[in-house]
Image (tube, rainbow, N blue to C red):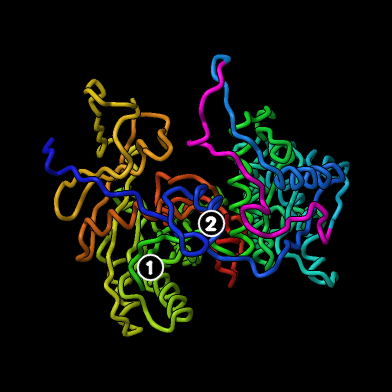
Amino acid sequence: MDIEKLKYYPEPKLTFGSNQATEDPRDGLMLFGPNEKFSRTSIKAGVVGTSEGIQLYKDFVIKLQSPIISSKKMYGNEIQIEAQRPSFVGFEAIYGIEWNDEPILTKQLLEVQINAILEEKNKKKRTRSLVDFYAKKIIESKQKDDKRVDIWFVIVPRNVYIKCRYGAKGEELSKKLDKKITMLNEGQFSLYPDYDEDLKELEKLKEDSSDFHNLLKAVLLKNKIESPIQVFVEPTLRFRDKLRNKEYSDDMKSHLAWTTSVAIYYKLGNKPWVLNDVRKDVCYLGLIFKQLPDKSNKQSVCSAAQMFLEDGDGSIFRGNIGLFKSERAEGYHLDEKSAESLLGMALDDFQESKGYFPKELFIHGRVKFQDKEWKGFNNALEARKAETNLNGILIKDTRSDARRKLKIFKDTDREGQDNNYGIMRGLAWHIDEKSAYLFTRGYIPRTNSTNHLETANPLYIEINRGNSKIETVLKDILALTKLNYNACVYGDGLPVTLRFSDLIGNILTATSEWQSEMRQFKYYI
Protein backbone atom coordinates (compact mmCIF):
# COMPACT_ATOMS: atom_id res chain seq x y z
CA MET A 1 0.00 0.00 0.00
CA ASP A 2 1.26 3.48 -0.92
CA ILE A 3 1.34 5.33 2.43
CA GLU A 4 1.21 8.69 0.60
CA LYS A 5 -2.34 7.90 -0.47
CA LEU A 6 -3.48 7.79 3.15
CA LYS A 7 -5.12 10.96 4.45
CA TYR A 8 -6.89 11.82 7.67
CA TYR A 9 -10.05 13.96 7.63
CA PRO A 10 -10.73 15.71 10.96
CA GLU A 11 -13.96 14.93 12.78
CA PRO A 12 -16.76 17.29 11.68
CA LYS A 13 -18.18 19.46 14.45
CA LEU A 14 -21.83 20.09 15.28
CA THR A 15 -23.46 23.38 16.28
CA PHE A 16 -25.75 23.65 19.32
CA GLY A 17 -27.36 26.40 21.37
CA SER A 18 -25.68 29.83 21.49
CA ASN A 19 -23.84 28.83 18.29
CA GLN A 20 -21.43 26.63 20.24
CA ALA A 21 -19.74 23.65 18.59
CA THR A 22 -18.59 20.20 19.78
CA GLU A 23 -17.77 16.86 18.18
CA ASP A 24 -20.08 14.70 20.31
CA PRO A 25 -23.81 15.52 20.22
CA ARG A 26 -24.20 14.50 23.86
CA ASP A 27 -21.52 16.99 24.92
CA GLY A 28 -23.20 19.75 22.97
CA LEU A 29 -26.68 19.05 24.31
CA MET A 30 -25.49 18.86 27.92
CA LEU A 31 -23.36 22.01 27.74
CA PHE A 32 -25.28 24.28 25.38
CA GLY A 33 -28.74 22.82 24.74
CA PRO A 34 -30.32 22.18 21.33
CA ASN A 35 -29.60 24.27 18.26
CA GLU A 36 -33.27 25.11 17.66
CA LYS A 37 -35.49 26.00 20.59
CA PHE A 38 -39.01 24.62 20.93
CA SER A 39 -41.63 27.33 20.48
CA ARG A 40 -43.55 26.40 23.65
CA THR A 41 -42.60 25.60 27.23
CA SER A 42 -44.13 22.10 27.30
CA ILE A 43 -45.00 19.13 25.09
CA LYS A 44 -48.62 18.40 24.24
CA ALA A 45 -48.61 14.62 24.07
CA GLY A 46 -51.28 12.15 23.04
CA VAL A 47 -51.08 8.48 24.06
CA VAL A 48 -52.77 5.41 22.60
CA GLY A 49 -52.46 2.11 24.44
CA THR A 50 -53.87 -0.29 26.98
CA SER A 51 -54.28 0.81 30.61
CA GLU A 52 -50.97 -0.88 31.41
CA GLY A 53 -49.26 0.69 28.42
CA ILE A 54 -50.47 4.18 29.35
CA GLN A 55 -49.19 3.77 32.90
CA LEU A 56 -45.83 2.51 31.59
CA TYR A 57 -45.62 5.62 29.42
CA LYS A 58 -46.21 7.86 32.44
CA ASP A 59 -43.59 6.03 34.50
CA PHE A 60 -41.10 6.30 31.63
CA VAL A 61 -41.61 10.06 31.28
CA ILE A 62 -41.08 10.51 35.04
CA LYS A 63 -37.81 8.55 34.85
CA LEU A 64 -36.56 10.73 32.01
CA GLN A 65 -36.95 13.85 34.15
CA SER A 66 -34.15 12.73 36.47
CA PRO A 67 -30.53 11.79 35.74
CA ILE A 68 -29.82 8.23 34.64
CA ILE A 69 -26.29 7.38 35.68
CA SER A 70 -24.27 5.34 33.20
CA SER A 71 -22.27 2.49 34.69
CA LYS A 72 -21.17 -0.96 33.63
CA LYS A 73 -19.65 -4.03 35.22
CA MET A 74 -17.45 -6.59 33.53
CA TYR A 75 -16.36 -9.73 35.35
CA GLY A 76 -17.63 -8.20 38.59
CA ASN A 77 -15.59 -5.01 38.26
CA GLU A 78 -16.88 -1.50 37.60
CA ILE A 79 -15.42 -0.10 34.37
CA GLN A 80 -15.23 3.50 33.17
CA ILE A 81 -17.95 3.99 30.54
CA GLU A 82 -18.84 7.69 30.88
CA ALA A 83 -16.91 8.78 27.78
CA GLN A 84 -18.50 6.14 25.54
CA ARG A 85 -22.00 6.27 26.99
CA PRO A 86 -22.41 9.40 29.12
CA SER A 87 -25.03 9.68 31.85
CA PHE A 88 -28.36 11.20 30.86
CA VAL A 89 -28.91 14.39 32.84
CA GLY A 90 -32.70 14.74 32.45
CA PHE A 91 -35.03 15.77 29.63
CA GLU A 92 -35.97 19.25 30.82
CA ALA A 93 -32.41 20.00 31.90
CA ILE A 94 -31.18 19.26 28.35
CA TYR A 95 -33.93 20.64 26.14
CA GLY A 96 -35.37 23.38 28.33
CA ILE A 97 -39.00 22.27 27.95
CA GLU A 98 -41.40 20.43 30.20
CA TRP A 99 -42.57 16.92 29.34
CA ASN A 100 -45.45 16.23 31.68
CA ASP A 101 -46.22 12.61 32.45
CA GLU A 102 -49.95 13.36 32.07
CA PRO A 103 -50.80 13.50 28.34
CA ILE A 104 -53.37 16.03 27.14
CA LEU A 105 -55.17 13.25 25.21
CA THR A 106 -55.42 9.58 26.18
CA LYS A 107 -56.98 6.87 24.03
CA GLN A 108 -57.34 3.60 25.91
CA LEU A 109 -57.60 0.25 24.16
CA LEU A 110 -58.74 -3.02 25.68
CA GLU A 111 -56.02 -5.65 25.85
CA VAL A 112 -58.60 -8.41 25.37
CA GLN A 113 -59.51 -6.92 21.97
CA ILE A 114 -55.85 -6.74 20.95
CA ASN A 115 -55.34 -10.37 21.93
CA ALA A 116 -58.41 -11.39 19.94
CA ILE A 117 -57.01 -9.72 16.82
CA LEU A 118 -53.66 -11.44 17.35
CA GLU A 119 -55.40 -14.84 17.14
CA GLU A 120 -55.76 -14.32 13.38
CA LYS A 121 -53.43 -16.78 11.61
CA ASN A 122 -52.86 -14.75 8.44
CA LYS A 123 -49.94 -12.35 9.08
CA LYS A 124 -51.11 -9.52 6.88
CA LYS A 125 -54.71 -9.74 8.01
CA ARG A 126 -53.89 -9.53 11.73
CA THR A 127 -51.40 -6.69 11.18
CA ARG A 128 -53.88 -4.69 9.12
CA SER A 129 -56.67 -5.25 11.67
CA LEU A 130 -54.43 -4.19 14.52
CA VAL A 131 -53.16 -1.11 12.68
CA ASP A 132 -56.75 -0.07 11.92
CA PHE A 133 -57.63 -0.63 15.59
CA TYR A 134 -54.90 1.78 16.75
CA ALA A 135 -55.10 4.23 13.84
CA LYS A 136 -58.84 4.70 14.27
CA LYS A 137 -58.30 6.36 17.64
CA ILE A 138 -55.84 8.89 16.19
CA ILE A 139 -57.89 9.58 13.05
CA GLU A 140 -61.07 10.07 15.08
CA SER A 141 -59.22 12.44 17.41
CA LYS A 142 -58.40 14.69 14.48
CA GLN A 143 -62.10 14.86 13.65
CA LYS A 144 -63.59 15.07 17.15
CA ASP A 145 -61.15 16.45 19.71
CA ASP A 146 -60.63 20.18 20.16
CA LYS A 147 -57.17 19.63 21.62
CA ARG A 148 -54.27 19.16 19.23
CA VAL A 149 -51.19 17.20 20.16
CA ASP A 150 -47.56 17.80 19.18
CA ILE A 151 -46.79 14.09 19.03
CA TRP A 152 -48.66 10.80 19.40
CA PHE A 153 -47.13 8.02 21.48
CA VAL A 154 -48.39 4.60 20.39
CA ILE A 155 -47.76 1.98 23.08
CA VAL A 156 -48.00 -1.65 21.99
CA PRO A 157 -47.71 -4.84 24.07
CA ARG A 158 -44.73 -7.09 23.45
CA ASN A 159 -46.86 -9.77 21.76
CA VAL A 160 -47.82 -7.21 19.08
CA TYR A 161 -44.13 -6.71 18.32
CA ILE A 162 -43.54 -10.47 18.22
CA LYS A 163 -46.49 -11.28 15.97
CA CYS A 164 -46.67 -8.18 13.75
CA ARG A 165 -43.17 -7.60 12.41
CA TYR A 166 -41.04 -8.83 9.54
CA GLY A 167 -40.14 -12.46 10.06
CA ALA A 168 -43.09 -13.17 12.36
CA LYS A 169 -44.77 -16.55 12.06
CA GLY A 170 -48.11 -16.80 10.29
CA GLU A 171 -49.93 -17.79 7.15
CA GLU A 172 -49.21 -16.18 3.81
CA LEU A 173 -51.73 -15.69 1.03
CA SER A 174 -51.69 -19.09 -0.69
CA LYS A 175 -51.20 -19.55 -4.43
CA LYS A 176 -54.64 -21.18 -4.54
CA LEU A 177 -56.31 -18.09 -3.09
CA ASP A 178 -54.23 -15.85 -5.34
CA LYS A 179 -55.51 -17.78 -8.37
CA LYS A 180 -59.13 -17.42 -7.18
CA ILE A 181 -58.63 -13.67 -6.75
CA THR A 182 -57.34 -13.48 -10.33
CA MET A 183 -60.37 -15.42 -11.57
CA LEU A 184 -62.70 -13.10 -9.63
CA ASN A 185 -61.10 -10.04 -11.23
CA GLU A 186 -61.61 -11.65 -14.62
CA GLY A 187 -65.36 -11.93 -13.93
CA GLN A 188 -65.58 -15.54 -12.77
CA PHE A 189 -67.77 -15.18 -9.69
CA SER A 190 -68.50 -17.98 -7.22
CA LEU A 191 -71.91 -19.16 -6.04
CA TYR A 192 -71.41 -17.40 -2.71
CA PRO A 193 -71.33 -13.56 -2.72
CA ASP A 194 -69.90 -13.45 0.83
CA TYR A 195 -66.94 -15.58 -0.28
CA ASP A 196 -66.30 -13.20 -3.17
CA GLU A 197 -66.32 -10.25 -0.75
CA ASP A 198 -63.78 -12.04 1.45
CA LEU A 199 -61.56 -12.56 -1.57
CA LYS A 200 -61.75 -8.84 -2.40
CA GLU A 201 -60.67 -8.00 1.15
CA LEU A 202 -57.74 -10.42 0.92
CA GLU A 203 -56.71 -8.86 -2.40
CA LYS A 204 -56.35 -5.49 -0.69
CA LEU A 205 -54.00 -7.10 1.83
CA LYS A 206 -51.65 -8.39 -0.88
CA GLU A 207 -49.95 -5.01 -1.08
CA ASP A 208 -49.94 -4.43 2.69
CA SER A 209 -46.88 -4.80 4.89
CA SER A 210 -46.99 -7.34 7.71
CA ASP A 211 -44.96 -4.97 9.93
CA PHE A 212 -47.07 -2.99 12.42
CA HIS A 213 -44.71 -0.02 12.73
CA ASN A 214 -44.37 0.60 8.98
CA LEU A 215 -48.02 0.01 8.11
CA LEU A 216 -49.23 2.26 10.94
CA LYS A 217 -47.02 5.13 9.78
CA ALA A 218 -48.14 4.67 6.17
CA VAL A 219 -51.84 4.62 7.12
CA LEU A 220 -51.56 7.75 9.26
CA LEU A 221 -49.60 9.59 6.57
CA LYS A 222 -52.25 8.56 4.07
CA ASN A 223 -54.86 10.10 6.38
CA LYS A 224 -52.78 13.30 6.72
CA ILE A 225 -52.23 13.05 10.46
CA GLU A 226 -49.89 16.00 11.01
CA SER A 227 -48.64 15.00 14.46
CA PRO A 228 -45.61 12.67 14.20
CA ILE A 229 -45.79 9.19 15.71
CA GLN A 230 -43.47 7.56 18.23
CA VAL A 231 -44.10 3.82 18.63
CA PHE A 232 -43.00 2.21 21.90
CA VAL A 233 -43.07 -1.50 22.69
CA GLU A 234 -43.96 -1.90 26.38
CA PRO A 235 -40.65 -3.54 27.45
CA THR A 236 -38.78 -0.49 26.10
CA LEU A 237 -40.63 1.70 28.59
CA ARG A 238 -39.41 -0.68 31.30
CA PHE A 239 -35.84 -0.28 30.01
CA ARG A 240 -35.86 -3.87 28.79
CA ASP A 241 -34.98 -5.51 25.49
CA LYS A 242 -38.20 -5.85 23.48
CA LEU A 243 -37.23 -9.16 21.90
CA ARG A 244 -35.75 -11.06 24.85
CA ASN A 245 -37.43 -8.95 27.57
CA LYS A 246 -34.11 -8.73 29.40
CA GLU A 247 -33.35 -5.68 31.56
CA TYR A 248 -30.80 -3.24 30.16
CA SER A 249 -27.54 -2.49 31.94
CA ASP A 250 -27.25 1.02 33.41
CA ASP A 251 -25.12 2.31 30.52
CA MET A 252 -27.73 1.08 28.01
CA LYS A 253 -30.50 2.71 30.04
CA SER A 254 -28.78 6.07 29.70
CA HIS A 255 -28.17 5.38 26.00
CA LEU A 256 -31.89 4.63 25.51
CA ALA A 257 -32.78 7.90 27.25
CA TRP A 258 -30.43 9.91 25.02
CA THR A 259 -31.64 8.25 21.83
CA THR A 260 -35.34 8.51 22.69
CA SER A 261 -35.15 12.13 23.78
CA VAL A 262 -33.31 13.26 20.64
CA ALA A 263 -35.78 11.47 18.35
CA ILE A 264 -38.74 13.01 20.17
CA TYR A 265 -37.25 16.50 20.13
CA TYR A 266 -36.64 16.22 16.38
CA LYS A 267 -40.17 14.97 15.78
CA LEU A 268 -41.44 18.06 17.58
CA GLY A 269 -40.06 20.02 14.62
CA ASN A 270 -36.71 21.15 16.03
CA LYS A 271 -33.19 20.18 15.06
CA PRO A 272 -31.12 19.19 18.12
CA TRP A 273 -27.93 20.10 16.22
CA VAL A 274 -26.75 21.12 12.77
CA LEU A 275 -23.45 20.70 10.95
CA ASN A 276 -20.93 23.36 11.89
CA ASP A 277 -18.82 23.80 8.75
CA VAL A 278 -21.06 23.47 5.73
CA ARG A 279 -21.05 24.85 2.24
CA LYS A 280 -24.11 26.96 1.51
CA ASP A 281 -26.79 26.06 -1.02
CA VAL A 282 -25.73 22.43 -1.32
CA CYS A 283 -28.14 19.52 -1.06
CA TYR A 284 -27.76 15.75 -0.98
CA LEU A 285 -30.12 13.19 -2.45
CA GLY A 286 -30.13 9.50 -1.51
CA LEU A 287 -31.87 7.08 -3.87
CA ILE A 288 -34.24 4.42 -2.52
CA PHE A 289 -35.53 1.29 -4.24
CA LYS A 290 -37.93 -1.09 -2.52
CA GLN A 291 -39.75 -4.14 -3.83
CA LEU A 292 -43.48 -4.12 -3.15
CA PRO A 293 -44.86 -6.45 -0.43
CA ASP A 294 -47.00 -8.29 -3.00
CA LYS A 295 -44.83 -11.38 -3.52
CA SER A 296 -46.77 -12.39 -6.62
CA ASN A 297 -45.46 -9.27 -8.38
CA LYS A 298 -41.70 -9.55 -7.88
CA GLN A 299 -40.88 -7.27 -10.83
CA SER A 300 -42.45 -4.09 -9.42
CA VAL A 301 -40.13 -1.82 -7.47
CA CYS A 302 -40.94 1.51 -5.85
CA SER A 303 -38.43 4.32 -6.38
CA ALA A 304 -37.95 7.20 -3.98
CA ALA A 305 -35.42 9.74 -2.78
CA GLN A 306 -34.55 11.42 0.48
CA MET A 307 -33.16 14.92 0.26
CA PHE A 308 -31.11 16.67 2.94
CA LEU A 309 -30.11 20.32 2.94
CA GLU A 310 -26.93 21.67 4.48
CA ASP A 311 -28.80 22.60 7.68
CA GLY A 312 -30.13 19.05 8.22
CA ASP A 313 -33.68 19.52 6.90
CA GLY A 314 -34.88 16.30 5.29
CA SER A 315 -37.66 15.50 2.81
CA ILE A 316 -38.95 12.28 1.25
CA PHE A 317 -40.17 11.93 -2.34
CA ARG A 318 -41.89 8.85 -3.67
CA GLY A 319 -41.30 8.23 -7.36
CA ASN A 320 -42.68 5.83 -9.92
CA ILE A 321 -43.19 2.09 -9.62
CA GLY A 322 -41.54 0.18 -12.42
CA LEU A 323 -39.17 -2.53 -13.58
CA PHE A 324 -35.97 -0.95 -12.28
CA LYS A 325 -33.85 -4.09 -11.86
CA SER A 326 -30.55 -3.91 -13.73
CA GLU A 327 -30.05 -6.42 -16.54
CA ARG A 328 -26.60 -7.18 -15.10
CA ALA A 329 -28.08 -7.91 -11.65
CA GLU A 330 -25.93 -5.18 -10.09
CA GLY A 331 -28.78 -3.33 -8.48
CA TYR A 332 -31.60 -0.96 -9.42
CA HIS A 333 -31.61 1.81 -12.02
CA LEU A 334 -34.23 4.41 -12.91
CA ASP A 335 -35.46 4.84 -16.45
CA GLU A 336 -35.09 8.28 -18.02
CA LYS A 337 -38.64 9.43 -17.32
CA SER A 338 -38.63 8.27 -13.68
CA ALA A 339 -35.23 9.89 -13.05
CA GLU A 340 -36.47 13.21 -14.41
CA SER A 341 -39.66 13.04 -12.34
CA LEU A 342 -37.91 12.13 -9.09
CA LEU A 343 -35.22 14.80 -9.29
CA GLY A 344 -37.80 17.30 -10.48
CA MET A 345 -39.78 16.88 -7.25
CA ALA A 346 -36.65 17.46 -5.18
CA LEU A 347 -35.63 20.55 -7.16
CA ASP A 348 -39.10 22.04 -6.91
CA ASP A 349 -39.15 21.44 -3.16
CA PHE A 350 -35.76 23.12 -2.74
CA GLN A 351 -36.80 26.07 -4.89
CA GLU A 352 -40.07 26.45 -2.99
CA SER A 353 -38.30 26.60 0.38
CA LYS A 354 -35.27 28.69 -0.66
CA GLY A 355 -36.50 30.73 -3.60
CA TYR A 356 -33.73 29.44 -5.88
CA PHE A 357 -32.15 26.18 -7.01
CA PRO A 358 -29.11 24.62 -5.30
CA LYS A 359 -25.61 25.48 -6.48
CA GLU A 360 -24.53 21.88 -6.05
CA LEU A 361 -26.50 18.65 -5.81
CA PHE A 362 -24.98 15.29 -4.91
CA ILE A 363 -26.95 12.13 -5.69
CA HIS A 364 -25.88 9.18 -3.54
CA GLY A 365 -26.54 5.67 -4.81
CA ARG A 366 -25.42 2.10 -4.20
CA VAL A 367 -24.68 1.37 -7.88
CA LYS A 368 -23.06 3.29 -10.74
CA PHE A 369 -25.39 5.60 -12.61
CA GLN A 370 -26.36 4.60 -16.13
CA ASP A 371 -26.61 6.94 -19.10
CA LYS A 372 -30.40 6.80 -19.28
CA GLU A 373 -31.01 7.80 -15.69
CA TRP A 374 -28.31 10.47 -15.77
CA LYS A 375 -29.95 11.92 -18.86
CA GLY A 376 -33.23 12.01 -16.95
CA PHE A 377 -31.60 13.89 -14.07
CA ASN A 378 -30.16 16.45 -16.48
CA ASN A 379 -33.53 16.78 -18.20
CA ALA A 380 -35.00 17.86 -14.85
CA LEU A 381 -32.35 20.58 -14.53
CA GLU A 382 -32.78 21.78 -18.10
CA ALA A 383 -36.58 21.94 -17.81
CA ARG A 384 -36.18 24.34 -14.87
CA LYS A 385 -33.20 26.22 -16.28
CA ALA A 386 -31.40 25.34 -13.04
CA GLU A 387 -27.67 26.08 -13.07
CA THR A 388 -26.91 23.33 -10.59
CA ASN A 389 -23.64 21.41 -10.55
CA LEU A 390 -24.84 17.80 -10.50
CA ASN A 391 -22.69 14.96 -9.16
CA GLY A 392 -23.41 11.22 -8.93
CA ILE A 393 -21.68 9.47 -6.04
CA LEU A 394 -21.42 5.69 -5.66
CA ILE A 395 -21.25 4.59 -2.00
CA LYS A 396 -20.68 0.93 -1.16
CA ASP A 397 -20.43 -0.53 2.31
CA THR A 398 -17.53 -2.95 1.93
CA ARG A 399 -18.88 -5.18 4.70
CA SER A 400 -21.30 -6.61 2.13
CA ASP A 401 -19.18 -6.19 -1.01
CA ALA A 402 -16.46 -8.86 -1.27
CA ARG A 403 -15.03 -7.30 -4.45
CA ARG A 404 -14.08 -4.10 -2.64
CA LYS A 405 -12.87 -5.46 0.69
CA LEU A 406 -10.10 -3.46 2.32
CA LYS A 407 -8.54 -3.88 5.75
CA ILE A 408 -5.96 -1.59 7.29
CA PHE A 409 -4.31 -2.58 10.56
CA LYS A 410 -2.43 -0.40 13.01
CA ASP A 411 0.83 -1.43 14.63
CA THR A 412 0.07 -1.38 18.36
CA ASP A 413 3.51 -2.51 19.49
CA ARG A 414 5.09 0.89 19.03
CA GLU A 415 6.16 2.90 22.05
CA GLY A 416 3.54 5.41 23.16
CA GLN A 417 0.52 3.51 21.86
CA ASP A 418 -2.25 3.77 24.44
CA ASN A 419 -5.06 1.81 22.76
CA ASN A 420 -5.69 -1.35 20.82
CA TYR A 421 -8.70 -0.14 18.85
CA GLY A 422 -7.13 -0.02 15.40
CA ILE A 423 -7.22 2.82 12.90
CA MET A 424 -9.06 6.09 13.42
CA ARG A 425 -12.43 7.08 12.08
CA GLY A 426 -11.82 9.67 9.33
CA LEU A 427 -8.88 7.90 7.71
CA ALA A 428 -9.09 7.60 3.92
CA TRP A 429 -7.07 5.80 1.28
CA HIS A 430 -7.21 7.67 -2.03
CA ILE A 431 -7.21 5.36 -5.04
CA ASP A 432 -7.24 8.14 -7.64
CA GLU A 433 -8.86 11.52 -8.27
CA LYS A 434 -12.32 9.97 -8.49
CA SER A 435 -12.39 7.20 -5.88
CA ALA A 436 -11.30 6.41 -2.34
CA TYR A 437 -11.98 4.32 0.74
CA LEU A 438 -13.26 6.23 3.78
CA PHE A 439 -13.31 4.80 7.30
CA THR A 440 -16.48 6.15 8.89
CA ARG A 441 -16.02 3.41 11.49
CA GLY A 442 -12.92 3.35 13.65
CA TYR A 443 -11.23 4.57 16.80
CA ILE A 444 -12.64 7.81 18.24
CA PRO A 445 -10.29 9.73 20.59
CA ARG A 446 -13.13 11.63 22.28
CA THR A 447 -14.78 8.43 23.51
CA ASN A 448 -11.56 6.38 23.66
CA SER A 449 -13.51 3.64 21.90
CA THR A 450 -14.88 2.65 18.51
CA ASN A 451 -18.26 2.78 16.77
CA HIS A 452 -18.00 -0.78 15.50
CA LEU A 453 -17.61 -4.30 16.90
CA GLU A 454 -15.33 -5.90 14.34
CA THR A 455 -12.17 -4.79 12.52
CA ALA A 456 -13.24 -1.55 10.85
CA ASN A 457 -14.55 -1.78 7.29
CA PRO A 458 -14.52 1.37 5.13
CA LEU A 459 -16.97 2.77 2.62
CA TYR A 460 -15.93 2.64 -1.03
CA ILE A 461 -16.72 6.02 -2.58
CA GLU A 462 -16.54 6.92 -6.25
CA ILE A 463 -17.45 10.04 -8.18
CA ASN A 464 -19.33 8.24 -10.92
CA ARG A 465 -20.65 11.37 -12.62
CA GLY A 466 -19.74 15.03 -12.31
CA ASN A 467 -16.59 17.03 -11.68
CA SER A 468 -16.46 17.45 -7.91
CA LYS A 469 -13.22 16.84 -6.02
CA ILE A 470 -12.89 13.59 -4.08
CA GLU A 471 -11.69 15.49 -0.98
CA THR A 472 -14.92 17.49 -0.95
CA VAL A 473 -17.04 14.37 -1.36
CA LEU A 474 -15.27 12.53 1.48
CA LYS A 475 -15.64 15.49 3.87
CA ASP A 476 -19.36 15.72 3.05
CA ILE A 477 -20.00 12.02 3.58
CA LEU A 478 -18.14 11.99 6.90
CA ALA A 479 -20.26 14.97 8.03
CA LEU A 480 -23.49 13.30 6.89
CA THR A 481 -22.79 10.38 9.22
CA LYS A 482 -23.54 12.82 12.08
CA LEU A 483 -27.09 13.79 11.05
CA ASN A 484 -28.93 10.77 12.44
CA TYR A 485 -31.62 12.40 14.59
CA ASN A 486 -33.18 9.01 15.33
CA ALA A 487 -30.31 8.25 17.71
CA CYS A 488 -27.81 10.11 19.84
CA VAL A 489 -24.45 8.63 18.91
CA TYR A 490 -21.08 10.11 18.07
CA GLY A 491 -21.29 9.13 14.41
CA ASP A 492 -22.85 6.51 12.15
CA GLY A 493 -21.15 4.20 9.69
CA LEU A 494 -23.37 5.38 6.83
CA PRO A 495 -24.33 8.91 5.70
CA VAL A 496 -27.90 9.88 6.50
CA THR A 497 -28.70 9.88 2.75
CA LEU A 498 -28.44 6.08 2.77
CA ARG A 499 -28.77 5.22 6.48
CA PHE A 500 -32.59 5.09 6.48
CA SER A 501 -33.25 3.96 2.91
CA ASP A 502 -34.60 0.53 3.91
CA LEU A 503 -36.82 1.92 6.68
CA ILE A 504 -38.26 4.66 4.46
CA GLY A 505 -38.73 2.24 1.58
CA ASN A 506 -40.64 -0.10 3.89
CA ILE A 507 -43.04 2.71 4.87
CA LEU A 508 -43.48 3.97 1.31
CA THR A 509 -44.47 0.47 0.15
CA ALA A 510 -46.42 -0.55 3.27
CA THR A 511 -49.84 -0.10 1.68
CA SER A 512 -51.37 0.29 -1.77
CA GLU A 513 -52.25 3.60 -3.45
CA TRP A 514 -49.88 5.39 -1.12
CA GLN A 515 -49.65 9.12 -1.71
CA SER A 516 -48.81 11.85 0.73
CA GLU A 517 -47.82 15.49 0.54
CA MET A 518 -46.28 15.15 4.01
CA ARG A 519 -42.65 14.86 3.04
CA GLN A 520 -40.79 15.91 6.18
CA PHE A 521 -38.25 13.34 7.30
CA LYS A 522 -39.59 13.39 10.88
CA TYR A 523 -42.69 11.43 9.81
CA TYR A 524 -40.68 8.45 8.58
CA ILE A 525 -38.31 7.64 11.46
The residue at the point 69 percent across, 65 percent down is: 227
Residue 30 lies left or right of residue 216; in this view the side is: left
**Element class at badge 1:** strand
Q: Locate residue 34: give its quadrant.
A: bottom right
Q: CA distance from mark 2 to mark 1?
A: 27 Å
The answer to whether 17 appears left or right of 241 in the picture is left
Percent coordinates x, y for residue 308 in the rendering: 44, 64
Crowd around label 1: few <14 · some 14–19 · many ≥20 (10 Å) = many
Which residue is depicted at the point 74% across and 36% down?
159
The circle drawn on residue 283 is: 1
Q: Give, as a three-letter code, the residue at label 1.
A: Cys
**Three-letter amino acid code of the residue under disc 2:** Phe
Please, what secondary structure does the residue beneath circle 2 have?
helix
> Which quadrant holds the C terminus?
bottom right
The answer to whether 467 appears left or right of 277 in the picture is left
Instruction: Indicate yes or no whether the magenta region holds residue 272.
Output: no
Q: Residue furthest top?
A: 75
Magenta-highlighted residues: 77-105
Closer to the chain start, of discs 2 and 1, is 2
Answer left or right for 101 relative to 310.
right
Q: Position of residue 199 (x, y in %)?
A: 72, 53
Reply above or below: 383 against 329. below
